Amino acid sequence: MAFAVRKLKHRPWPVTVTLQSANADGDIVETEHKFIGHFAPFSEKEYKALVEALKAPVPVAEQPTTNDQVAAELAIADVLERNAKLFSRVLVGWEKVEDESGQPLPYSHDELHAMVTGPDGLAISNGFGRAISEIRFGGAAAKNLNTSVEPGQKSGAAEAATSSPQT
């Protein structure tokens, strides 16, 4: 089968948001919420330019010495605000997003902004960020993949022999 070049108007992609709450016993409970984001097609060059354009300038007198320090010094509210701007430039719609009464919530930049900068903004930002990374780098990470032998186990007989020293 030949490869056909796609001309996408949007790319539907799953977004998973994990929210935490405490139950009556005080135990933390995580719930996964999944929906479909409609992402505008973008190249890596376009995405990098967008991220660069949204970086807040730091006054010369306050400039730290490493990028890690810049990230650490941004207030969380500023990060969420920047995320809302970024996501509104790459997201063009969604499916399976509902309001508190269970009614479909139409996509709008205002709704997206309220979600990303609201009480669950960090979790929502994490979900969108993970989806964008999956789009950029070629797909969702494999879940429950045993990449190495657990302590006390032996390698399977079907594994190829290597020249690596044994540990």
Image: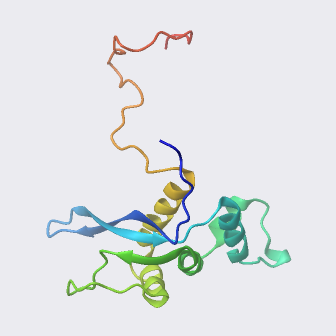
Q: How many marks?
A: 0
The residue furthest left is: 24
The residue furthest bottom is: 110
- Relative image position of residue 126 (x, y in whole percent): 46, 65
- Relative image position of residue 71 (x, y in whole percent): 65, 66
Question: Is residue 4 left or right of 147 when viewed as pictured?
Answer: right
Q: Nearer the viewer, residue 18 or 8?
A: 8
Q: Is residue 69 visible?
A: yes
Question: Residue sitting at 52 percent across and 50 percent down?
Answer: 138
Question: Is residue 122 left or right of 143 when viewed as pictured?
Answer: right
Q: Nearer the viewer, residue 144 or 107?
A: 107
- Relative image position of residue 33 (x, y in whole percent): 29, 67
- Image coloring type: rainbow
The residue furthest front is: 1
Question: Residue sitting at 52 percent across and 62 percent down?
Answer: 132
Q: Nearer the viewer, residue 131 or 24?
A: 131
Quadrant hosting residue 28? bottom left
Q: Indicate whether 102 appears above or below 46.
A: below
Question: Residue sitting at 56 percent across and 81 percent down?
Answer: 81
Q: Is residue 120 visible?
A: no
Q: Indicate whether 1 appears above or below 57.
A: above
Question: Is residue 73 left or right of 39 when viewed as pictured?
Answer: right
Quadrant hosting residue 89? bottom right
Q: Indicate whether 136 appears above or below 57.
A: above
Question: Residue sitting at 58 percent across and 80 percent down?
Answer: 85
Q: Nearer the viewer, residue 148 or 133?
A: 133
